[in-house]
């Protein structure tokens, strides 16, 4: 492992030089690639430097201790040695976490799909709550959001919504939101005060670029039509809405958010590419069964992951058995505590698996 860390440190120095290279600075794609590699290595190299520094201090002070005669100096050296040993223990634990194999998609932007599930109109209202929650979370994280297709249902409800969240590390945070979200509350239309249970499904897909997934243009059927709003009324006088059908898989993507047909087609293509990439990723993950067992659920749309209980004012994540009693705050986009707990649990399980190998 020591050799690998030394190699990482040398590689890091090379990347540092490249970031100052005019040739790299003038090429946006190359600069992004080098910056990403640099930022991935930076925390590992910094932690490794702390380890080597602490080891050097322990070695140096141990040698000085052999020759020290003054009692005050002896006490000082012993204190410094103990402190550095404690730090060294912590640094090594930190390094283990940093060396956990990274999800290659973590740096990517994401496409979020929300669909109302069981529960009729109440499910649509809950889907609307989740749509608002993720937009507010993205705003707090300084991420950018861009709607692709939003299908409204009744007042304040949604049948389904698809949108992009852009920002470094967006997928690393939001990937844990994939699955079935369940709400328990008394609907406004319920005169008897009975609690109803409704669901909404969330899918979080890493945005795939053309390098990740190749699509044969002959495999796509494109239909155009006039975009419509609530109740089906036309909101545009031109055929700007686009429906793409991927013939081999039967996947269908629609987009009517933009007034331009070209822009709608571009957005729809991005969603289609992400869905096809997800299919390929699921095939790959099935082949790595050990990895599936050692991670917190981050992809199965059918997995019931979380319950939002209004009467009790709580949110419970069933994957890690964590409950937060701040429902209103959570629905206002303050979901970072839950996400960080999921990341920690995921890291713990992966560390355990690494220790067993």
Image: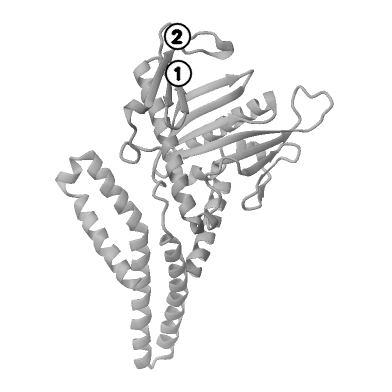
Task: Inspect this view and state whether residue 18 appears.
Answer: yes
Where on the picture, by quarter, is residue 46? bottom left
> Considering only vertical position in the picture, is 314 above or below 119?
below
Which residue is the extreme one toward the top? 237
Q: Identify the residue at horizontal 35%, vertical 67% (top origin).
A: 48
SS state under label 1 = loop
Q: Please state if 337 lies on the left or on the right of 238 as rendered.
A: right
Residue drawn at 45 percent across, 62 percent down: 97
**Quarter-wise, where is residue 14 in the image?**
bottom left
Tell me which residue sits at (64%, 18%) in the image.
Answer: 155
Task: Tell me the crowding category of disc 1: few under 14, some 14 to 19, or many 20 or more residues within 10 angstroms, Cα based.
Answer: many
Q: Nearer the viewer, residue 140 or 38?
A: 38
Q: Is residue 170 above or below residue 120?
A: below
> Mark 2 sits on what residue?
236
The numbered mark at residue 256 is 1
Q: What is the x, y in percent for residue 77? A: 41, 83
**Residue 43 pos. (x, y %):** 37, 58
Residue at 52 percent across and 52 percent down: it is: 343
- Direction from residue 309 to residue 161 in the image, left or right: left
- Is 345 or 255 nearer to us in this picture? 255
Vertical comparison of 351 with 36: above or below = below
Dots 2, 1 in contact, CB < 8 A: yes
């Amino acid at each position: 492992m020591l050799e690998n860390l030394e190699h990482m440190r040398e590689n890091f120095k090379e990347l540092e030089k490249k970031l100052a290279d005019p040739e790299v600075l003038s090429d946006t794609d190359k600069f992004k690639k080098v910056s990403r590699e640099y930022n991935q290595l930076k925390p590992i190299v910094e932690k490794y430097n702390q380890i080597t520094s602490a080891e050097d201090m322990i070695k140096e002070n141990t040698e000085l201790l052999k020759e020290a005669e003054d009692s005050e100096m002896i006490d000082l050296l012993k204190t410094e040695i103990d402190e550095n040993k404690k730090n060294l223990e912590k640094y090594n634990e930190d390094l283990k976490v940093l060396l956990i194999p990274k999800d290659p998609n973590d740096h990517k932007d994401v496409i979020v799909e929300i669909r109302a599930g069981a529960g009729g109109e109440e499910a649509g209202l809950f889907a609307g709550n989740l749509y608002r929650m993720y937009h507010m979370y993205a705003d707090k994280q300084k991420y950018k959001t861009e709607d692709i297709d939003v299908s409204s249902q009744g007042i304040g409800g949604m049948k389904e919504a698809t949108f992009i969240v852009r920002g470094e590390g967006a997928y690393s945070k939001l990937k844990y939101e994939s699955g079935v979200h369940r709400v328990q509350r008394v609907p406004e239309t319920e005169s008897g005060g009975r609690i109803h249970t409704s669901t909404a499904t969330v899918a979080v897909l890493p945005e795939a670029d053309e390098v990740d997934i190749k699509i044969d243009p002959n495999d796509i059927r494109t239909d155009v039509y006039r975009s419509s709003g609530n109740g089906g009324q036309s909101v545009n006088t031109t055929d700007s809405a686009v429906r793409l059908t991927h013939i081999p898989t039967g996947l269908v993507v629609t987009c009517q958010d933009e007034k331009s047909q070209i822009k709608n087609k571009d957005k729809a293509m991005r969603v289609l590419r992400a869905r096809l990439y997800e299919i390929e990723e699921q095939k790959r993950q099935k082949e790595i069964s050990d990895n599936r067992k050692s991670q917190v659920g981050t992809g199965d749309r059918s997995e019931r992951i979380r319950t939002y209980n209004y009467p009790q004012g709580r949110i419970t994540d069933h994957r890690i058995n964590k409950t937060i009693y701040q429902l209103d705050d959570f629905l206002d986009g303050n979901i970072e505590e839950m996400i960080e707990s999921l990341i920690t649990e995921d890291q713990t399980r992966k560390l355990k698996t690494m220790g067993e190998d």
